Image (spheres, rainbow, N blue to C red):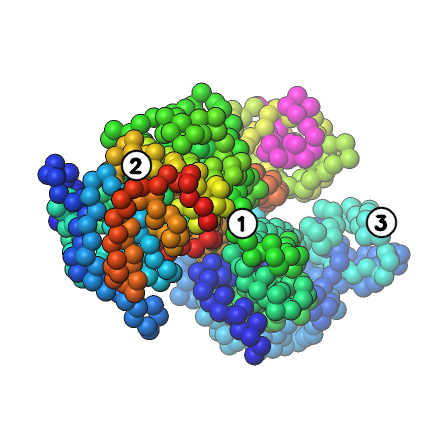
Amino acid sequence: MSGSIATTPEREPVFCTRGLIKTYQVGEVEIAALRGVDLELHAGELVVILGASGSGKSTLVNILGGLDRASGGTVRYRGQDLSLADDRALTAYRRRHVGFVFQFYNLISSLTARENVAIVTEISTDPMPPEEALALVGLADRLDHFPAQLSGGEQQRVAIARAVAKRPAVLLCDEPTGALDSQTGIRVLEVLRRINEGLGATTAIITHNRVIGEMADRVVRLGDGRVQEVRVNARRRDPAELSW
Amino acid sequence: MRALSRKALRDLARLKGQVAAIAVVIAAGVMVLILTVAMREAIASAQARFYETQRFADVFAELERAPERVAARLRELPGIDQIETRVQAPVRLEVPGFAGPVRGLLLSLPDGRQPALNRLHLREGALPAPGRADQVVLSEPFAEAHGLRPGDALRAIVNGREVDLVVSGLALSPEFIYQVAPTDLLPDYAHYGVLWMGRPGLAEAMDMDGAFNSLVLTLAPGADPRAVIAAVDRRLARYGGIGATDRDEQISHRFLADELDQLRVMALVLPAVFLGVAAFLLNLLMARIVTGQRQQIAILKAFGYGDGAIAGHFGLMAGLVVVLGLALGIALGAWAASGLVGLYAEYFRFPQMGLRLPPQSLALALALAVAAALLGTLGAVRRAARQPPAEAMRPPAPERFRPSWLDRSPLGRYLGQPTRIIVRNLSRHRAKTLFSTVGIALSGGLLLLGSYQFGAVDRLLDVQYRLVMQMDLHLTLTEPTSFGALAELRAQLGVRHVEGYRSAAVRLVAGRRDYRTAILGVEAAPRLRRLLDGEHRPVPVPPDGLLLTRYLADYLGVRPGGSVTVEVLEGHRRALAVGVAGVVDEPIGLGAYMARPALNRLMGEGPAVSGAWLLVDPAAQERLLARLWEMPRIAGIALVADAERQFRDYIGDTVLATMTILLLMAGSITFAVVYNNARIAFAERARELATLRVLGLTRAEVSWILIGEIAVLTLLAIPLGWLVGTGFAALLSWAMTTDLFRMPWIITPRTYAFSAAGVLVAAALSVTAIARRLGRLDMVLALKTLD
């Protein structure tokens, strides 16, 4: 597949992986990060992918986000096979459909909060204004601050605003609270939940923190490169109720 | 090897591209230093040795004719050590198998032995045997040009009489290390030679029995040369002395001294430029390494390595780069010097010119390179040593940025974010931006300088040979001859146009300044030897008064409307005040011009000429030359096209070689600066760039951030390079403005374009090298690492 990855309206899983395998060559050693993952993510749901370090959770999200290619199996986004997409198509896919939030925020230090958001909205088709995205994460009064002038929590909220401003279908968050203290982390999770509800973006949060699983619709526990358990929460807890 | 040293080697190996680029810039600086110092040393020591062993004179005087007893009285003057009198004669030569006109200077040797001063260094054969009036020693380059060996024959026309000569030996003389005809700038060994013969024979031919017309002397230790010259001049005035001179006005010595001066300037300026740029690049590299290894440094410190060991470790890395550059530079310098020695040996004839790398130049190169390294590395190494371990373990805080002036300007709103990133990065690291721009600009400036030099010399030759000298042949007569003699020349087959001129040796005096030259008396509107103004328009020749070359008028401090004292150095030898009617602009030599009838009046003679310029039919030129050669009154024939070719060959030899070296070196600077900047920017921003790729920016959009920065630096550097280069060129043109020749001040759009193109090509090459890295940018890895 070369061109773009089309958006299909059918009511089917947003993501569907079957027998997903990923092996890395690290020096002379081959490491199997994923050993056959079968998983579905549905439109609008908030999924927490839990796993210890080395469980393969980051690898899974990288493949879902179009940053990496699987070594075997299939990964479908709305019916299109991502493992067949070329570099150009994956770039377009990330640009149109996916929002990323990283553990270390990954803001561009030479751009202000507003500009960090604008760098994404400038290349999107139907974005919200950067100011609106920042208001959404409670930073309407920090628009012209540079990353060096913001706290860790604020930086992560800018990163979330950047991820959601393009109105993505999918929001992928890799350890979004990993570099934050628990109080700040909870505020970040509140923002994520609000956005998941408000924008209806399918949201996957990767974490090793079991507690965070309680805010999800479903919790997927990865271990040893496989899905160990999928649990559906009867009731999503408000992040404010969480503590660790 | 200790683990830490091993780490230094491996780290350097990982950065081999940058290390090599910096080492090449150091090498370029060291190479120029070694080259210029070694050449200067080789020439200066060969000169000193040759002057000493052959007892080169300090003062030189020419006169019409003085009896030998005058020399005996001169010996009594204070301040004089030794005096050697001799007879000299301008001659025409006929060399078997060589059709062209050959001029020569015949000098006397004491009968059967070496002179006391200006002794000959015999390369082959022997001095003329006592009493043999037919034997001559030839200057070696002249003999080589014609393949003449001892025993070979040639013919000379001395004082209008043909003399058959046999070569007894070949020699070099300290007086003719740079062997050039009196009015030329370049040696032309085929058309001009120096010969020596026994004094009795030459004196007889020149009617100089018991007399002399040339004198050289050495000064007693501590003597004031000016006092001696003044005393000699007073004694010789009545014998037609035209004024004694010291070594500074001796042609060969003057050219050598100029060359040594030029080498000294080169030895100072170019290495400073290169080593300065190298220091800056080392600084960038080491700062980057230290920042990149902050965690490793912390770990080493946690293990118990002290500040000294850490500083030593990074010092070792910088030191290895310097050693690499130094070794390469010394090797290249020695190689280039051995090539250049051959080129110099063609123009400067010493018995031997030994090239050795003087230890002091090696020590100097070492000291300068180490100084550059220290300058470049000290800050980064100190930072590495001082860093507290705990701080280093934490991830670095985001860099502080501020909106730049461009953001605040109305234009700021229209900037895209990637462009904003470029602008902010450049303005955040102002010193780095400045030094990078200056570094690239310096290389652009060097390119411009090389191109200017080439263009200016070309222009100089064009003006001289296409605009000023319009004749095909230039004839000089043995003595001033009636104007009517020109009719005989006009009648020759193949002669299309003849213009006679009168040339008279004079000293021009204005206030306390004086200059020896010749006044050229020309027709009212000379066609074959034009007199031009600054815009190359013909200057009308006034019926009375002098036209002076602009540089000469400036030197004498006179303007049109003023006057100079003309001391005539031949014939009646009177001094007369003559008005200055105007100035002319010409690139070569310093001359004074007058209407020929006015000069004839000044000389107190009837209509007379001392030479002629001819326009000839090329098809008939060879036969015409043969016939002109038969005329005993013709002392010399010069082919103007030959002289031009000679000049252009010389330019081809030297300027082109210099240009190539300059181009390579300037290119290496641009490449090193751009490549290092790009590599460091890439390393510093790999994470940001990967993030942008993750966010959906295309490869091209991400590349723009890096390449745009290089583009901005390069575009800023180009006009700055033009400015720097124009400054270099102005300095060069100023340094090259001498009485011998003036470099025209002309920088064409092509010169600017050449400088810009050179910088752009080097920048494009480095961008290509970086683009490959951008292609391999690993998004996943970049997200995981902190720095």
Which residue position holds label 1?
Answer: B396
Amino acid on which disc 3 is placed: Ala
Q: Are marks 1 and 2 in contact (CB under 8 Å)?
A: no
Residue B88, image x, y percentages: 65, 58
Question: Of callouts 1 and 3, which one flags the residue occurring earlier in the amino acid sequence?
Answer: 3
Mark linked to residue B593? none
The chain that hosts pointer 1 is B
Q: Nearer the viewer, residue A224 or B19?
A: A224
Describe residue B12's horizontal placement relative to residue B82 as left or right: left
Residue B725, image x, y percentages: 52, 41
Q: Secondary structure at mark 2?
A: helix
Residue A35, image x, y percentages: 23, 65
Q: Secondary structure at mark 1?
A: loop
Q: How many numbered marks appear?
A: 3
Describe residue B54's horizontal placement relative to residue B328 as left or right: right
Which label lies toward us, 1 or 2?
2
The chain that hosts pointer 3 is B
Residue at image location 27% in from the left, 63% down from the top: A225
Q: Nearer the viewer, residue B717 or B159?
A: B717
Amino acid on which disc 2 is placed: Asn
